[in-house]
Image (tube, rainbow, N blue to C red):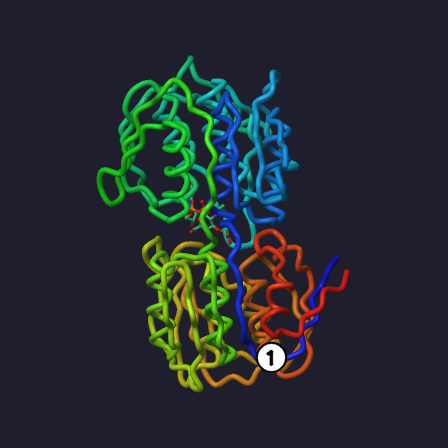
């Protein structure tokens, strides 16, 4: 199993270019199951979750051709589409559940594995199933699989999500594209990745309109057209590099990302003392000499502070000049990084879903274990400013969602080595 060796403290200076968004690319790729004609998707990040989704699509009968490089794929329907999404693929990546909506919408049947929980929480899929049921899907759960079908086309419906869910919103939007009639989805997630999905589907002729802040109207069409679409930049990767620069008193130019998408995060970084200049597709961020503490950061749905940056901000606040708090309101178990950060010297107390972080920590390098994607990158950040050498084990978690992270970090001054 690969590990990283990082020798700190490192100075961060230079330029980094942001890759395509994993969490936008995954639903876009799943939605290609709706198409009869080929589609071309550009700016895919080269990360393991994308490979897993492409393998899942292949197992469902899609033909995948890489064009130019591994960032552009042409996806075509073959004559033998299948409708079985296996446990072996879905268990490694929960976004596998996103093939359920398109399979039922297009082929009126699917056997899709339940994804199961993961380290950050139980993560059930009841909102996905309830919404698809309202669109006319019938289902039974047998031996860990969702056996789903519909009598012909799905039917448009009015659906109000009882809680905001990114995945359930995506599955429902995708499924409603080929349903008969009008679907109104209320209390939708409005993460930028969802807007990227609807922009992609609209580029292929889907009739989708946002008619309120969290209300989406979809009028079903008979089929979707050929299209070429470039996936948006990764806002969590961008946020992670912004934290790195702030934490390490760095001076970083972050390219290929629209700063307007992460205003909440940039405002928080300004609050802790970072100097930030933005232009159309670029962020220049300089870390302060002294990081200020913040109380009461709470993770919440977009446009609020994202759970996917909670671990990274926690590392930053360990170095602040006073006590800070972070409340995690999206996932019930997303503090796995805390125990590992303590191994580096952090003083963090967790009570229920609230972490209290003492500032002025002098991190000392140590041997560490990754537990999930964002927890792993938080350990990398801490190791960058720790004195001495840190070893981060199980970095396959990082490879799921950060493209060539060690190359990007090396270029901006981090002493990092991958051991295979
Ligand atoms: C998406 O997960 C992202 N994954 C996650 O990114 C992200 O952390 C999360 O949204 C929140 O922003 C992808 O986009 C592939 P949810 P998703 O449905 O869709 C509960 C990363 O690090 N819930 O919005 O699974 C759920 O348990 C990852 O890149 C139900 O109870 O998130 C959670 O507590 C990790 N029933 C909350 O809702 C359901 O049917 C929000 O989950 C669905 C969700």
Please give left or right for residue 274 compared with residue 4 in the image. left
Between 336 and 94, the one nearer to me in the picture: 94
Residue 10 percent across, percent down from the top left: 60, 79
Which residue occupies 37% across, 38% down? 199
Please tell me whether mark 1 sits on a helix, a strand or a loop: loop
Q: Is mark 1 within 8 Å of ligand 1?
A: no
> In terms of image quadrants, where is residue 143?
top right
Between 128 and 258, the one nearer to me in the picture: 258
Q: Is residue 283 above or below residue 225?
A: below
Please give the residue where the numbered disc 1 appears in the rendered image: 10
Q: Is residue 411 above or below residue 231?
A: below
Q: Is residue 173 above or below residue 385?
A: above
Which residue occupies 59% across, 55% down? 403
Q: Residue furthest left?
A: 212
Q: Quadrant of the N terminus?
A: bottom right
Please give left or right for residue 105 compared with residue 402 in the image. left
């Amino acid at each position: 199993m690969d590990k990283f060796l990082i020798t700190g403290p490192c100075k961060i200076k230079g330029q980094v270019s942001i890759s395509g968004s994993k969490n936008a690319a995954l639903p876009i790729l799943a939605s290609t199951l709706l198409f009869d004609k080929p589609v071309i998707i550009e700016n895919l990040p080269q990360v393991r979750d994308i490979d897993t989704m492409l393998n899942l699509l292949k197992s469902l009968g899609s033909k995948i051709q890489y064009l130019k490089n591994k960032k552009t794929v042409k996806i075509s329907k073959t004559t033998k589409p299948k409708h079985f999404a296996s446990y072996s693929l879905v268990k490694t990546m929960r976004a596998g559940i996103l093939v359920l909506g398109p399979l039922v919408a297009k082929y009126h049947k699917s056997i899709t594995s339940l994804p199961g929980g993961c380290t950050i929480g139980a993560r059930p899929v009841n909102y996905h199933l309830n919404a698809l049921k309202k669109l006319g899907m019938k289902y039974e759960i047998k031996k860990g699989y969702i056996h789903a079908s519909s009598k012909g086309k799905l039917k448009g419906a009015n659906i109000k999500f009882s809680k905001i869910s990114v995945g359930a919103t995506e599955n429902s939007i995708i499924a409603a594209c080929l349903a008969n009639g009008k679907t109104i989805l209320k209390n939708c997630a409005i993460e930028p990745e969802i807007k990227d999905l609807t922009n992609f589907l609209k580029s292929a002729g889907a009739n989708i309109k946002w008619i309120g802040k969290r209300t989406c109207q979809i009028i079903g069409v008979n089929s979707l057209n050929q299209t070429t679409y470039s996936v948006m930049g990764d806002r969590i990767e961008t946020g992670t590099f912004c934290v790195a620069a702030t934490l390490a008193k760095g001076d970083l130019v972050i390219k290929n990302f629209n700063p307007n998408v992460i205003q909440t995060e940039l405002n928080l970084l300004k609050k802790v003392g970072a100097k930030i200049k933005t232009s159309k597709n670029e962020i220049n961020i300089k870390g302060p000499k002294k990081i200020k503490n913040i109380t009461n950061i709470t993770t919440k749905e977009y446009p609020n502070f994202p759970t996917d940056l909670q671990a990274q901000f926690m590392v930053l606040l360990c170095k602040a000049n006073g006590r800070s708090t972070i409340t995690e309101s999206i996932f019930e178990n997303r503090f796995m990084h805390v125990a590992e950060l303590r191994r580096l010297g952090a003083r963090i107390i967790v009570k229920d879903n609230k972490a209290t972080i003492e500032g002025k920590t002098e991190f000392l390098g140590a041997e560490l274990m990754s537990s999930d994607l964002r927890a792993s990158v938080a350990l990398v950040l801490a190791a960058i400013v720790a004195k001495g050498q840190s070893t981060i084990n199980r970095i396959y978690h990082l490879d799921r969602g950060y493209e060539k992270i060690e190359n990007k970090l090396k270029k901006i001054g981090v002493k990092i080595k991958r051991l295979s």
